[in-house]
Image: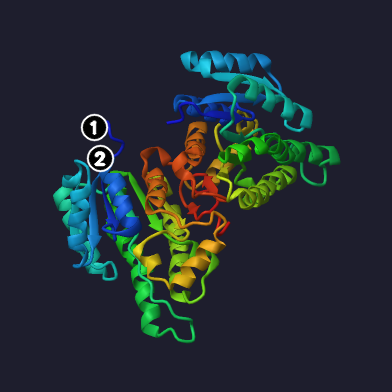
Amino acid sequence: MDSLPFAQRVGIVTGGSRGIGGAITTLLAEDGATVAVLGLPEDRERAHRLASLLNGAASRLHFYETDVAVYNRCQEAVAAVLREHGRIDFLVNNAGITRDHTVRKMTVEEWEAVLRVNLSGPFFMIKAVLDTMIQQEYGRIVNISSVVGEAGNFGQANYAAAKAGLIGLTKTVALEVAKRGITVNAVAPGFIDTDMTRAMPLAAIENAIEQTPGQRLGRPEEVAEVVRFLLDERSGYITGAVYNINGGWYM
Amino acid sequence: MFEGRVALVTGGTRGIGAAITECLVESGASVAAGYSRGKENAEQFVKRLGTNGSRVTVHQGRVDDVDDCNRVVKEVMDRFGRIDYLVNNAGITVDKTVRKMTVDDWRQVLDVNLSGAFQMTKALLEHMIERGSGRIVNISSVIGETGNVGQANYAASKAGLFGFTKSLALEMAQRGITVNCVAPGFIETEMVAAIPEPVLAKVVEKIPQRRLGRPEEVARVVRFLLEDESSYITGAVYSINGGLDM
């Protein structure tokens, strides 16, 4: 097992029980990492199901109930991971929600809910793990942004703002910890075949595929490959970067 | 990982290109490495690869010469029968401020760094289209995004590669061919070693990580983009620069 690339590595994937997060968790656990999946109460069951599908890696997936929108809950979850596993080598800020409406109809609550989970959540999580990573003089942080953060999208002012904000957060933290063995990068997926995308109206999905030069949705596993690449110890010179994977939807 | 696959790497016997050749050969590919000057260096390079060297061929030619591009592609096809990956890596610098830069200095750099990529691509694109698969990676530079004093020609050529990459990515999106850019920062190569020491010290001072990158680190990004699993990544620019330009 020591020959696996992530053997002895411990990390956190927020929203890691489903969608893109689930694919990231699977890939890393199968590569030998101990993965702490952070999620809401309703994700616990999903996480267990995911673990049962892992080939011989089930014991490396651990679920921690939390809400990334609440700072002290992030701190508690990180403390629990540290207590039980001793270190945190990587953090993947993947948890995200949508509350789609055009700005005219978007309520302040919808705006704030998305900003809080998708943008403040990563800030809270980074804050909660950063001292540990600095002490270790090693860390890999990947924030899952979105093509929508770069291009905007009809009906997604809140989501686009949060995902664009995440790029600013990524680059700033990358600068602040550049000399401490910690890299911070963003992955910006296009339209990926997940529950979140499937919740879109069918016409909107068809439109997204139509606008994607590759003429298909991406698969969560394809995004997970990019994340794994950035989390690799050997990717140490890549920091502050935004890696797109979108079938050519936005360049 | 790349067993049975064939890569053509321009400028593939020195600097970043040599690291790419080495990385791909280690991953099982056969590699045709182009070079313009330095036959001896090219042959030494293959020798240094040891047993892996048996899967490497070197090809002399200038990417700014259409006939050379076509001939090299033919040589590679004759030898290996297919080309799965093209890495447009060959590049030169002729540094001068614009006031002192001659038209010839400008043209030379554009011809190699930008037109060279276009010509090499053209020479094997039909082959990739026929096969319905292919990967093209263009080696751009952080300078293409930021510009740099004394490098108007280099910056223009490297920025031009972004436009070329994205346009070709669109044109090839439904043909199983991805086209991407890797944009390295300052990497430990002969090209960077040619920068006068005090200037280089200032450059490193500006890199958030306070170090130059290694050619092998860039090669890993290129290899990643060439993988079968990377088929949804196209028209992208993957930077690797220690935080220099974000």
Q: Give the SS element for disc 2.
A: loop
In the displayed structure image, the side of residue B182 where residue B160 appears, left or right:
right
Query: Which residue is found at the position 65% from the left and 13% from the top?
Result: B40
> Pointers 2 and 1 in contact (CB under 8 A)?
yes
- Chain of the residue displaying label 1: A
| Residue behind mark 2 | A32
Q: Quadrant of residue A30?
A: top left
Q: Give the SS element for disc 1.
A: loop
Q: Residue furthest front?
A: B130
Q: In the image, are marks 2 and 1 on the same chain?
A: yes
Q: Earlier in the sequence, mark 2 or mark 1?
A: 1
- State the separation of the CA atoms marked 2 and 1: 8 Å
Q: Nearer the viewer, residue A248 or B237?
A: A248
In the displayed structure image, the side of residue A139 where residue B163 appears, left or right:
right
* For residue A146, above or below residue B31: below
On the image, the x and y values in percent for residue A118 come to: 37, 67
Query: Which residue is found at the position 36% from the left and 83% from the top?
Result: A109
As shown in the figure, which amino acid type bears the numbered disc 2?
Gly
On the image, the x and y values in percent for residue B20 come to: 53, 30
As shown in the figure, which amino acid type bears the numbered disc 1?
Asp
Q: Residue furthest right?
A: B103
| Residue behind mark 1 | A2
Please tell me how crowded label 1 is: few (under 14), some (14-19), or many (20+) other residues with Cα within 10 Å.
Answer: few
Quarter that holds the N terminus of chain B: top left
* For residue A17, above or below residue B58: below
Query: Which residue is found at the position 66% from the left and 33% from the top?
Result: B90
* For residue A176, above or below residue A207: above
Q: Nearer the viewer, residue B98 or A100?
A: A100
On the image, the x and y values in percent for residue A199 come to: 37, 70
